[in-house]
Image: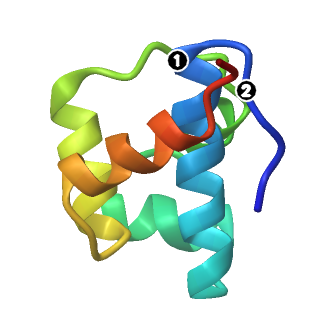
Amino acid sequence: MPSVATNEIAAFGLAVRARREAMGISQEALATRAKLHRTYVGSVERGERNVTLRNIYVLANALGTTPVALLADAGTLMKP
């Protein structure tokens, strides 16, 4: 399991990374599936982007999950 994040944005990025790595795909492959730029995906995973609702849906779909499940994953990665 990834390390615990200090804020919501970082936790979401860790959740995206964990799902991507569990699928065994690269950032570039995820970006292609999501029709996003690879550097954008990397910045999301590093917690550098405050992701829009639209892109939460796009990323979740590309990861084969739902936005609710992806956000739930992020919630479990938050520090108490």
Marks 2 and 1, how far apart in space?
7 Å
Q: Residue 33 appears in which quarter of the rendering?
A: bottom left
**Neighbours of disc 2 within 10 Å: few (<14), some (14-19), many (20+):** many
Would residue 11 appear left or right of 37 to someone viewing this image? Answer: right
Q: Are marks 2 and 1 in contact (CB under 8 Å)?
A: yes
Q: Residue at x 19, y 60 (%)?
A: 66
Q: Residue at x 45, y 13 (%)?
A: 50
Total marks in image: 2
Q: Residue at x 53, y 42 (%)?
A: 76
- Residue 40 visible from this viewpoint: no
Q: Secondary structure at mark 1?
A: helix
Amino acid carrying mark 2 in the image: Ala
- Residue 31 visible from this viewpoint: yes
Q: Residue at x 65, y 18 (%)?
A: 80
Q: Residue 51 appears in which quarter of the rendering?
A: top left
Q: Secondary structure at mark 2?
A: loop
Would residue 6 appear left or right of 9 to someone viewing this image? Answer: right
Residue 70 lies, in percent from the top left, at 36, 51
The answer to which of 37 and 24 lies nearer the viewer is 24
Would residue 41 appear left or right of 70 to someone viewing this image? Answer: right
| Residue projecting furthest to the front | 80
Residue 18 lies, in percent from the top left, at 64, 62
Residue 27 lies, in percent from the top left, at 64, 61
The answer to which of 76 and 60 lies nearer the viewer is 76
Q: Which residue position holds label 1?
A: 8
Amino acid carrying mark 1 in the image: Glu
Q: Which residue position holds label 2?
A: 5
The answer to which of 37 and 67 lies nearer the viewer is 67
Q: Residue 53 appears in which quarter of the rendering?
A: top left
Query: Is 17 drawn above or below residue 28 in the view shown?
Result: above
Residue 47 lies, in percent from the top left, at 66, 23
Would residue 19 appear left or right of 26 to someone viewing this image? Answer: left
